[in-house]
Amino acid sequence: MRALHDFGKACAAAHLAPRPLLPRSVETLRAHGSLDLSYCGIGDSYARALAVAIPRFGARLKSLELRDNRLLDEGVHALVQAAQPHYLPRLLELDISVNKLGPQSAQAIRDLLQV
């Protein structure tokens, strides 16, 4: 899957050790259109790398769950930018609850909802 390759490249470019975040969720994505990475503790650095890969999921992705991942404004902003409707036309659910959302996150989410 091209998204896994893009995630790996983005991790390498950011000098992050590869983490097995996506492979364990690919089967769920293929079967149900859901990518659940909740409780992985990915933080902003891995969130930026994940944001590079998210557009590759395209029309398959209906639900992206990132609950409780130590995300701050920077990571949430990158993920919300990657979740734009022209990249993910079938996305119905984006769960970023139990993260530390600040003003930048709130603005990015508001902008996404107005598209």
Image (cartoon, grey):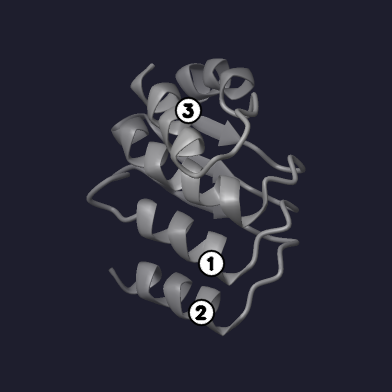
* 115 or 23, nearer to the observer: 23
For label 3, count other residues whose C-alpha is less than 10 Å away and answer few (under 14), some (14-19) or many (20+).
many
Residue 8 — which label? 3
For label 2, count other residues whose C-alpha is less than 10 Å away and answer few (under 14), some (14-19) or many (20+).
some
Left or right for 38, reference 52: right
* 49 or 93, nearer to the observer: 49
Pinpoint residue 10: horizontal percent, then vertical percent: 43, 38
**Three-letter residue code for mark 1:** Glu
Mark 2 against mark 1, which lies toward the viewer? 1
**Three-letter residue code for mark 3:** Gly
The residue that mark 2 highlights is: 104
Q: Residue furthest left?
A: 86
Pinpoint residue 30: horizontal percent, then vertical percent: 46, 18
**In the rendered view, would you say 77 is above or below 2?**
below
**In the rendered view, would you say 40 is above or below 108?**
above
Residue 74 — which label? 1
